[in-house]
Amino acid sequence: MNVQLTDGQGLAKTLQITVPAAKVAAQFESRVVAMAKTAKIQGFRPGKVPASVVRQKMGEDVARDVAQELVREALPAAIKQKELNVAGQPRVHNDGPVEGFKVVEGQDFSFKAELEVYPVVEPKGFEKLKLVRETAEPDEALIDNALSRLQTQMQTYGEKKGKAAKGDRVTFSGQGYVGDEAFEGGNLKDFAVVLGSGQLIPGFEDGLVGVSAGEKVELKVTFPKEYHAPKLAGKPAVFKVEIGKIETPQGDALDDAAAKKMGFESLDALKDIMRKGAVRELAQATEQRLKRQLLDALDEANKFMLPLGLVEAELKALWQAQLQELQARRQPVESLGSVEEVFASLKPLAERRVRLGLILAAVAKAQKIEVGQADLEKAVADQVEAAGPQADQARAYFANPANRQQLVGPVLEDKVTAWLLAQAEVSEKKVSAQALLAELQ
């Protein structure tokens, strides 16, 4: 087998692979013999079809099958021969004189593989880092807000006569305009929002306070400067909407009786669960904030070429996450703007994720950091504890080895991050619970 390697732009490489005619002939003959044992051809009993008939009747299929077999054998061997650390899936295509991807007996079989390799990463920027670990304790306001969110999630609504007030759910339809032009994604139909929930851009929900069913109103708002659609970011807009219906919350306040309906002994028991959850949430926020400082420093200090295929794959994953979030909010995909705009806005994040992934992988390799069975057991236990009332379901889910394997990546990342933090100078700072959580919004 002859292998030639050509450098392309950036991390791109091209392998020109040629399999000699003798190897092609041997594979072709082997495939013909195998097919003769199972081929069903009229006039012949199964397993009794002559090789010559298989060649005549099924020669094209054999030629394509052999080509695929040779690629499966030759490509890994060529990559190993050239000592390439391949990133992503190579793109294989025919480079022979015959149309289509197939072999020809008596001829060499040639094909090309276009691929990218991983860059050589030598992590830096984590030595002598100075970081701040921000910590907070849960207060009554945090617990009350958590209870309020829980009540909102479980809230039922009934039709209301009169004007909308904060806490009411308003359903409306309409169109948004920037200047005189209706913008893409601004068409809202039967959209429902609880006033005061903060679901919509600033000023929108405030403008619906005091409206009545059937009323037509114009809401003047300004899109945030960091809005996800670049064409709308920071722009003033007008939404012309018609109010469909107004609904008001039904049911009693959250008390012992309501808590018992949720499966808790009392409201105090529910608050205790909320408080424990808040402690976990704040602890996670502390570590996430500290980790973000570390990753920001690594991202800034390490600049190298990235495999374009990995960035593209990360972009698609981010796009899918955006679509799922829209679905959960029952918003149209057009609200994101054009696909080109969204991909352009997400590209820096995709590049950051790929870069940091390569940096952490390089640290893990250099420091021989691995995920052991004990690490995995602890991760499963943490997942089960965090599941609360759904602990049994979580335990059953992670009893499946394939599902447990999903935790390996995050656990390895945590172990590498812990090692990097151990190299840094970390000071402590007390902050309010609200300030700590706001950092991660």
Image (cartoon, helix red, strand yellow):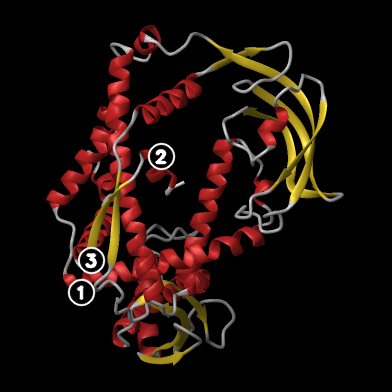
Is 267 on the left-hand or right-hand side of 178?
left
| Residue 406 seen | no
Residue 374: horizontal and vertical position, in percent?
12, 49
Q: Residues within 10 Å of mark 2 (few under 14, many from 20)?
A: some
Residue drawn 51% across and 49% down?
Answer: 321
Task: Kindly identify which residue carries mark 3.
Answer: 424
In the rendering, which numbered label is found on residue 438? Answer: none
| Residue 437 seen | yes
- The residue nearer to you, when weighing 329 against 42, is 329
Furthest residue toward right:
180
209 vs 180: above or below = above
Quarter of the figure with the N terminus? bottom left
Furthest residue toward left:
374
Question: How far apart are the two marked residues, 2 and 1, measured between alpha carbons?
Answer: 39 Å
Residue drawn 66% across and 58% down?
Answer: 230
Kind of residue sitting beneath label 1: Ala
Task: Kindly identify which residue carries mark 2.
Answer: 434
